[in-house]
């Protein structure tokens, strides 16, 4: 079978032919024929050594496919029995179930597990024709969910987690700023707009993405170098998807009273000295800084799937709206080039249905 393997030396993925397809060995193993798998910015950061990950494994933490083989007793994360032919999405983050955090949070918060590991980052993931997962990390999705759109569920769930953190404190009249115009920012815009927020501004360095972000639901786009960016407005909610400390500083400087800054994008590991804000000003504003890493493995991931499904039915989670490129294993090199040269925001590897 074909698979895309992480190659840390050449900072890319290598296409290999593996003789054996994975097989059920333990009672909770499930073999999935992968239909679509996505590459995102996290994969690139890992290949470039900015985040830890394992060399030589099957890449991919995003994906969905069809169950082709399993043990009779295999139960998915919702504790529903899985059957052959089910279409499933992978919740790729695993928690150990033993560490202090897993015990404290009753083993549903993979985001806090001290030994948390991820399919496609630490162990074989989704970018192969067939892949093996533990049943509890698979969620059944409706058969009608269009396959190529279903690949957005995992990145959507991460955005949904961040949204849940600010939902209660964000009012329809609030001024919202989404910083960045990559895949995460676009999903934030679409979700906030779907939830009825109208005053969404998007910040991106160049104006070229204005049409794309407006189509997804932002009212306007501001652009320019962040050091020179000026605005008369104060924002009630700023979601930073750039991971640039200077953007977070700017957000703190342009925050409204009682406003919230969400750190969503991945900041560089050693950004301690790059990040500063005026604590006195934040105090007088009663401003908040909230960080959002990944969804938990409990009800939240399921809730994200339900919301994604509602949006998909209304045509609001359509791959084509997000500048995603879909390629087969055979022509992935071309897709890879487009992705690293930022011509597409996500690379999806699709097999035949
Ligand atoms: Zn991702
Ligand atoms: Zn743990």
Image (cartoon, helix red, strand yellow):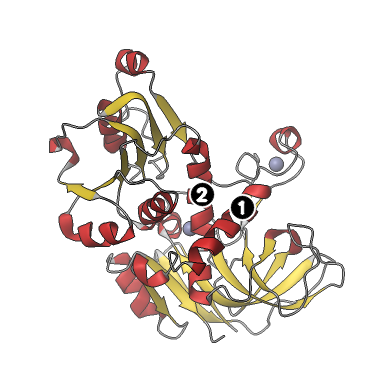
Residue 294 image point, x, y percent? 54, 46
Residue 124 image point, x, y percent? 61, 66
* Relative depth, front residue between 212 and 292: 212
Q: Is residue 216 left or right of residue 68?
A: left
Q: Are marks 1 and 2 in contact (CB under 8 Å)?
A: yes
- Identify the residue at horizontal 53%, vertical 66% (top origin): 59
Badge 2: few (under 14), some or many (20 or more) residues near its Cα, within 10 Å?
A: many
Residue 339 image point, x, y percent? 33, 68
Residue hosting label 1: 303
Q: CA distance from mark 1 to mark 2?
A: 9 Å
> Which quadrant is the N terminus positioned in?
bottom right
Which of marks 2 and 1 precedes in the sequence? Answer: 2
98 versus 39 height, above or below: above
- Identify the residue at horizontal 62%, vertical 66% (top origin): 89
**How many numbered discs?**
2
Residue 246 image point, x, y percent? 26, 35
Which SS class for mark 2?
Answer: helix
166 versus 328 height, above or below: above
Residue 170 in which image quadrant: top left
Q: Which mark is residue 138?
A: none
Does mark 1's beta carbon lie closer than 8 Å to ligand 1? no
Residue hosting label 2: 160
């Amino acid at each position: 079978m074909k698979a895309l393997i992480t190659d840390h030396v050449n900072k890319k993925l290598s296409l290999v032919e593996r003789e054996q397809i994975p097989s059920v060995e333990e009672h909770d193993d499930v073999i999935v024929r992968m239909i679509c798998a996505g590459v995102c910015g996290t994969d690139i950061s890992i290949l470039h050594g900015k985040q830890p990950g394992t060399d030589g494994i099957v890449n991919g933490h995003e994906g969905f496919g069809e169950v082709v083989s399993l043990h009779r007793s295999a139960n998915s994360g919702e504790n529903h029995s899985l059957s052959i032919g089910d279409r499933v999405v992978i919740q790729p983050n695993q928690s150990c179930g033993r560490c202090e955090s897993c015990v404290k949070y009753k083993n549903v918060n993979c985001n806090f597990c001290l030994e948390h590991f991820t399919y496609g980052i630490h162990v074989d993931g989704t970018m192969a024709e067939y892949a093996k997962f533990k049943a509890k990390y698979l969620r059944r999705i409706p058969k009608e969910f269009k396959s190529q759109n279903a690949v957005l569920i995992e990145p959507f769930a991460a955005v949904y987690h961040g949204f849940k953190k600010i939902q209660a404190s964000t009012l329809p009249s609030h001024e919202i700023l989404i910083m960045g115009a990559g895949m995460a920012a676009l999903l934030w815009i679409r979700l906030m707009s779907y939830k009825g927020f109208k005053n969404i501004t998007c910040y991106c360095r160049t104006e070229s993405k204005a049409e794309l972000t407006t189509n997804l639901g932002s009212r306007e786009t501001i652009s320019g170098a962040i050091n020179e960016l000026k605005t008369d407005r104060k924002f009630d909610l700023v979601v930073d998807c750039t991971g640039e400390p200077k953007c977070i500083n700017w957000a703190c400087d342009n925050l409204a009273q009682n406003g919230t800054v969400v750190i969503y994008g991945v900041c560089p590991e050693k950004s301690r000295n790059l990040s500063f804000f005026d604590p006195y000003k934040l105090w007088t504003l009663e401003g908040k800084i909230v960080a959002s890493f990944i969804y938990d493995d409990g009800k939240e991931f399921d809730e994200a799937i339900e919301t994604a499904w509602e949006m998909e039915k209304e045509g609001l989670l359509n791959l084509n709206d997000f500048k995603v490129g879909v390629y087969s294993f055979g022509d992935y090199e071309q897709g890879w080039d487009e992705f690293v040269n930022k011509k597409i925001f996500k690379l999806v590897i699709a097999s035949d249905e």
